[in-house]
Image (tube, grey):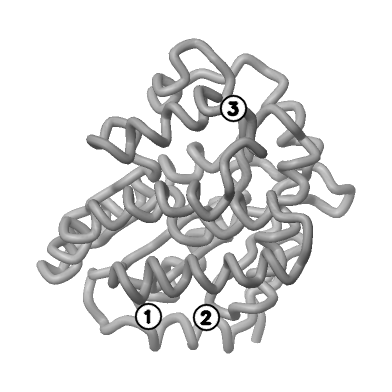
Amino acid sequence: MRVFFEDCYICDSDLKNLSKKVKRTAKMFIVLEGLDGAGKSTQVKKLKSYLETLGAPLSYIHFPRYDAPVYGNLISRFLRGDFGDIAAVHPQLVALLFAEDRHGAAPSMRAALEAGGTVLLDRYVYSNIAYQCAKLPSAEEAESLRNWIFDTEYGDFGLPKPDLNIFLDVPVSFVEASLAANRCGDDRGYLCGGQDIHEADIAFQKRVRDIYRRQCELDPSFIRVDCSDPQGRMLPPDEIFAKVKALVDALQN
């Protein structure tokens, strides 16, 4: 059997495999990934509202934590361009900043999960892989950095691994239009009125998307949700959320 959403199939076997990953409790660890300007914040809000109806305490973290001491401040400065453009700092050093930010949040995530709560993250380890590996000139260098990030974050730092890791794959045309607009929100204060250097180049965003999609091919637990209609246009937010909710519900059945 297949669950069918527009042009996206979620096989019954995939849903069953997801349900085996967690015990039949309210505890879940869920991550949403996506490009800048991809409508991820909208889906996070919808998912937060839904998870709150399930009864378990909900812990939500947006990475990077711009207000976190030391690494949050350094990340904010990097993204504002204080250290130069995206080519000015080696991607491995940038990856370490983002990894250390998550390392600092790991105790609170583990505590929430051990207490039987649900943890929802806006970005996690695959963001580090996608955005930093997209800056490297060769596939060999990108693979080496990918492996280093995995080993550092999940190995050396002992970060907990998600039960459900979702990549919201949106049309590049939607991202381009979104980034060209005057974006605003509570999570934009780190820019101090400037522009995020990761958002300044649509060609870079396309490379990031390619890396994300490649990771979904390499890792069956990293699930790509197609946010396009048959004509390649962005689906309405509610239709995208229906796909996300189906994956979340599979964890509970």
At x 29%, y 67%, the residue is: 157
Q: Position of residue 13 (x, y in %)?
A: 58, 88
Name which residue type carries label 2.
Leu
Q: Earlier in the sequence, mark 3 or mark 1?
A: 3
Q: Position of residue 135 (x, y in %)?
A: 69, 49
Secondary structure at numbered mark 2: helix
Name which residue type carries label 1.
Asn
Dot 3: within a 10 Å radius of its alpha carbon, few (fewer than 14), some, or many (20 or more) residues? few
Q: Is residue 115 left or right of residue 192?
A: left
User: Would you name the residue on which mark 1 appears?
Assistant: 253
Q: Earlier in the sequence, mark 1 or mark 2?
A: 2
Dot 1: within a 10 Å radius of its alpha carbon, few (fewer than 14), some, or many (20 or more) residues? some
Q: Is residue 171 left or right of residue 190?
A: right
At x 40%, y 19%, the residue is: 189
Q: State if disc 2 and disc 1 touch (CB < 8 Å).
A: yes
User: Would you name the residue on which mark 3 appears?
Assistant: 84
Compared with residue 211, is residue 88 higher up or lower down, i.e. above or below? above
Q: Is residue 21 left or right of residue 216?
A: left
